[in-house]
Amino acid sequence: MATNGKTITDLADDVAGKARTASKKAADKASDVIVEVKGEAAEIFEKAGAGAKTAASTGKDYAAEGLAGLADAARQIAGKLGDSPSDSGNAKAAEFARKAADSIDKFSTKLREKEVDEIAEDARSAVRNNPAIAVGAAAVIGFALARFLKGSGGREA
């Protein structure tokens, strides 16, 4: 049986060849699309990462400023306690407040000087070295956050 001088086998070979060509074109197009999507996704992730890093850096700076303010407040308290009569027992409290202010100030300075990536690596190291403390801190923070959210929700003015 022949159609236009071709046998069924010839027609099947033609169809198979066209199917292979179409499949190759589809695969090439899909590959191009995948490369394009990967490039766009990488660009989006890069922009998101840069934005997150900028936000973290800004937060770090705000935290450092807040800690510096806390250290100043502790120094003012220490000064007022130091002005009290020495036999009132406030001298020890004043000394404690000064030491606390110095410690807070040192931490604030370290926070200012470090990059966000360094702080993140320090945190990862602390969690690796002290997992029990990290879990406990996470639990306390979670509890405090839950209490805060519970306390601030549903209030009518």
Image (cartoon, rainbow, N blue to C red):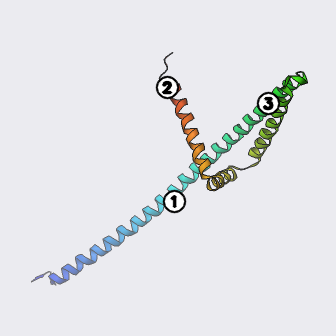
Local SS, label 3: helix
- From the viewer's perspective, is 102 left or right of 137? right
Looking at the rendered structure, the kind of residue marked 2 is Gly
Q: Which residue is mark 3?
A: 74
Q: Tell me the number on the disc at residue 137.
A: none
Residue at 27% over, 74% down: 18
In space, the residues marked 2 and 3 are separated at their CA atoms by: 33 Å
Residue that numbered label 2 is attached to: 153
Q: Amino acid at mark 3?
A: Ala
Q: Are marks 2 and 1 in contact (CB under 8 Å)?
A: no
Query: What amino acid is at disc 1?
Result: Gly
Local packing at callout 1 (Cα closer than 10 Å; few below 14, some 14-19, many 20+) is few
* Residue at the image point whose x is 39% and y is 65% from the top: 29
Foreground mark, 2 or 3, reads: 3
Q: Position of residue 106 (x, y in %)?
A: 80, 43
Residue 90 lies, in percent from the top left, at: 84, 26
Q: Earlier in the sequence, mark 2 or mark 1?
A: 1
Q: In which quadrant of the rendered image does the N terminus lie?
A: bottom left
Instruction: Tell me if mark 3 has few (under 14), some (14-19) or many (20+) residues whose alpha carbon lies within 10 angstroms of its own.
Output: many
Alpha carbon of mark 2 to alpha carbon of mark 1: how far?
43 Å
Of mark 3 and mark 1, the one earlier in the sequence is 1
From mark 3 to mark 1, how far is it between C-alphas? 52 Å
Asked if marks 2 and 3 touch (Cβ < 8 Å), the reply is no
Number of other residues with Cα within 10 Å of mark 2, as a class: few under 14, some 14 to 19, many 20 or more: few
